[in-house]
Image (cartoon, rainbow, N blue to C red):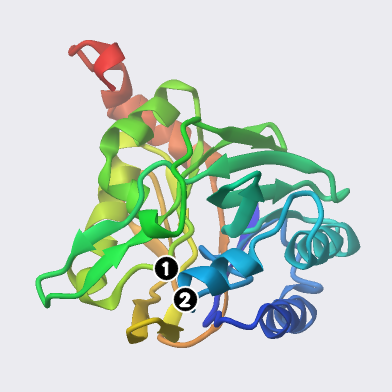
Amino acid sequence: MRVALMQLNSRDDKSENIATITRLFAERIAGQSVDLIALPEYSTFLGGLREVQWAAAEIFPDGEGYRALQELAKTYGVALHTGSMIEREGDKYYNTSVIFGPDGAERARYRKIHLFDVETPGGHVFRESDVIDRGNAIVDFTHKGRKFGCSICYDMRFSELYLRHMRNGCDVIMVPAAFNMETGKDHWEALLRARAIETQSWVIAAGQVGFHREAAGERACYGNSMVIDPWGTIVARASGKPGVILADIDFDYARHIRTILPSNTHHVLDQADA
């Protein structure tokens, strides 16, 4: 299965972000025999004051971002993981992944469970929960007979979610992100490789890169979008700028790893704890 990861520098201009995604489809995706495309977290809108982010939220299945990405999936006949968009339901706002099939039909919707409320070693404070409400459902989707587990960015620090995906039979884990530069340089690769190794699954992690506007100024995202195999080896990695990388997912290799080192069958602690 051939996958494409789109690394973006999304800003607080939805129409401009959509135009960039559309251009990259035409320039880098067309004619590449891609089966699935992965976008990063907050692909259609990133940054701005809380009220600006709320104003950019969409009530699915309506909205500029939802409709544009749905049409791209249908036009190019590919499965599209939208990374995430800001979804509004009633008076709540979610950081939500939507997955479209090659026919444009919505196949799954995942609302980020773990919200990024931290103070970095450099003293930068982030409170995603000031803008976003927490999801509560573990979600996967199927494409070409393979099961894909959903997660978003900060979720990657919580192994119990990924062990649930492993036990649910997932072959691939999706990790769209807008990973902070300060923590990314130390933790991004280490955490993603750990998630691949512990679940013996492929990991697809499309990220934001570069600066975007926030209330307190500008924030830098780490980029380094990557695909990791079930042994923990990075098989594709993006450069430090927006663009597209391609990788071929070999499910026979995953089966081989799970056969020679069957750690997925060796868990002895209470599975309900995970």
Place of residue 238 in the rendered image (x, y in percent of width and height, measured from the top left): 45, 77
Residue 131 as seen in the image, left or right of residue 31: left
Other residues around mark 2 within 10 Å, as few (<14) / some (14–19) / many (≥20) = some
How many numbered tags mark residues here? 2
Residue at point 75%, 49% (across, down):
60
Is 107 situated left or right of 82 in this image?
Answer: right
- Image spot of residue 159 (x, y percent): 27, 37
User: Residue placed at 44% from the left, 30% from the top?
Assistant: 165
State whether residue 172 appears in this view.
Answer: yes
Judging depth in this view, the residue of 48 and 203 nearest the camera is 48
Q: Nearer the viewer, mark 1 or mark 2?
A: 2
Q: Residue at x 59, y 59 (%)?
A: 86
In the rendered image, residue 58, in percent from the top left (x then y), is placed at 70, 58
In this figure, which residue is indicated by the disc labeled 1? 178
Amino acid type indicated by mark 1: Ala
In this rendering, would 109 be left or right of 160?
A: right
Would residue 246 be seen by someone viewing this image from the given angle? no
Q: Which residue is denoted by mark 2 in the rendering? A: 49
Residue sitting at 48 percent across and 22 percent down? 168
Residue 273, by quadrant, is: top left
Residue 254: percent from left, percent from top? 45, 38
Q: Amino acid at mark 2?
A: Leu
The quadrant of the image that shows the C terminus is: top left
Q: Is residue 163 above or below residue 81?
A: above
Q: Pick the residue in front: 18 or 142.
A: 18
Q: Secondary structure at mark 1?
A: loop
Under circle 2, the secondary element is: loop
Q: Residue furthest left?
A: 121
Above or below 233: residue 32: below
How dense is the environment of label 1, judged by Cα within 10 Å: few (below 14), some, or many (20 and up)?
many
Q: Is residue 181 above or below residue 187?
A: below
Q: Is residue 36 left or right of residue 135?
A: right
